[in-house]
Image (tube, helix red, strand yellow):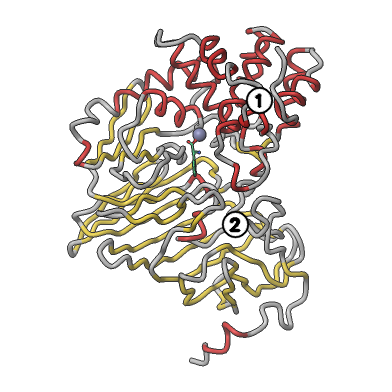
Amino acid sequence: MLSLPLASTPASAGVAGTPGSPGAGDPYFPTQGNGGYDTQHYDLALDYNPSSNALQGAATITSRATQDLSAFNLDLVDTLTVRSVTVNGAAAAFTQSGSELTVTAALAPGQTFTTVVRYDGKPTHVLDPDGSRDGWIRTSDGVYNANEPQGAMTWYPGNHHMTDKATYRFSVTVPDTRVAVANGDLTSRSSGGGRTTYVWDARQPMASYLTTVSIGKFELTDTTLGGYRTITAVDPKLAGQATGFAARHAPVLDYFSSLFGPYPFSSTGGIVDHEPNVGYALETQTRPIYPRVPSENLLAHELAHQWFGDSVTPERWQDIWLNEGFATYAEWLWADRRGVRTVQAAFDAAYAVPAGDAFWQTPPADPGGPADLFHDPVYDRGAMTLHALRAKVGDTAFFAILKGWASTYRYGNASTADLLALSEQISGAQLDTLFDAWLFQPGKPAL
Ligand code: TRP
Ligand code: ZN
């Protein structure tokens, strides 16, 4: 078969229409995501060998063209080799360059199309601008798979900006000695020839930075607790410390449901890995991943993200405080509920940082750039912003704003400007000065 020249054919040669943009236009990560189409569903079939790190993938992606296309891009690092691409069943020409996979296809605006990408290789994580690792992070027995902000492109092709949410199915085949855990609901498990295939369905829309396929020697539990299907995976090294881990979810979710509205997803749970070299947990949708057994604060933080970050997702990375400020505030709420510390005391402790401290120089809604996404002011000053809003509008309006935010933008994306508009609409107060001082101006806001 004369397939060799395909990969070097100019991607849009001889095809009518306009190539889709290679990025979604996010200033912090300009090549992340792609323009010209909108993705609805990913079906990822993965086969992984932990000892050799060999991954084989087949990604079946259902999308809709939003313009007349001659070609479109997917994000996938070129350490993985694409073997073939089909669009609506027909072989398509493609090129790989850096993290852009460009596929030639003539598509009409509004047309739904199915892309199948077959690829393989030895995935590796990426280094983020802040120096942390993200993506396919190998552990002693598998993979710690955390993809915020840009790791998804290290293991599957996709439209990897947070504005293009989709549903997912993951079918992951690993040796019988390992477990593959992903987002959503475990729908089947089948073994043969020394290998086991786990199928996970994530039925509610998800941004790709919230996906995970984590692999290891896990103890898997799947039970319904307090009405929530709770699926946990715990590294056996931590089993002793993790006693009761599954049962810790329902009380937090019940409390947050009473404040934020119904839990948005069809299952919950968590992945507790033993990964001392990764410093962070992540709110992977339905099933956060933790590098150790989480404290009650950390558990509450990641579960609050299910409403704030996962169901309601920012439109751009600069607005990350909408995730981290809300999740930090939820930690304060849960600590108050448990009688550990009042929200007011948490605010006072955070506000006590002296005005001259560098902390106050970073406004949470304008943290500076992609290296500053997860800096303290995004979390703590973000949470303080919510408390300042609460003090200004009163408890009734404030909790109506939190519920309204979760319901209005459920499964979607929203911006800081949307929060201001909703807060003013619900409270009837004028809040632009408060938002500006707390979120956009350097310096310690006055009370
Ligand atoms: N979103 C995570 C949390 O707060 C934190 C996180 C994700 C992070 N990626 C990171 C922190 C990289 C530091 C570096 O739950
Ligand atoms: Zn967080």
Residue 234 x, y percent position in the rendering: 26, 39
| Residue 219: quarter of image | top left
Give the vertical position of 26 relative to 380 (above or below): below
Q: Is residue 161 visible?
A: yes
| Residue 39: quarter of image | bottom right
Which label lies toward us, 1 or 2?
A: 1
Residue that badge 1 annotates: 356
Relative to residue 357, is residue 253 drawn left or right? left
Relative to residue 22, is residue 60 drawn left or right? left
Number of the label disc, if any, that sits on residue 159:
2
| Residue 363: quarter of image | top right
Three-letter amino acid code of the residue under disc 2: Asn
Neighbourhood count class around disc 2 (C-alpha, 10 Å): few under 14, some 14–19, many 20 upward: many
Q: Residue at x 27, y 59 (%)?
A: 174
Q: Secondary structure at mark 2?
A: loop
**Closer to the camera, 110 or 39?**
39
Give the vertical position of 444 relative to 165 (above or below): above
Q: Is residue 412 visible?
A: no
Q: Residue at x 34, y 43 (%)?
A: 186
Relative to residue 283, is residue 277 drawn left or right? left
**Closer to the camera, 391 or 286?**
391
Q: Secondary structure at mark 1?
A: loop
Farthest-out residue, front:
356
Neighbourhood count class around disc 1 (C-alpha, 10 Å): few under 14, some 14–19, many 20 upward: few
Question: Which quadrant is home to the C terminus?
Answer: top right
Q: Residue at x 73, y 20 (%)?
A: 423
Three-letter amino acid code of the residue under disc 1: Gly
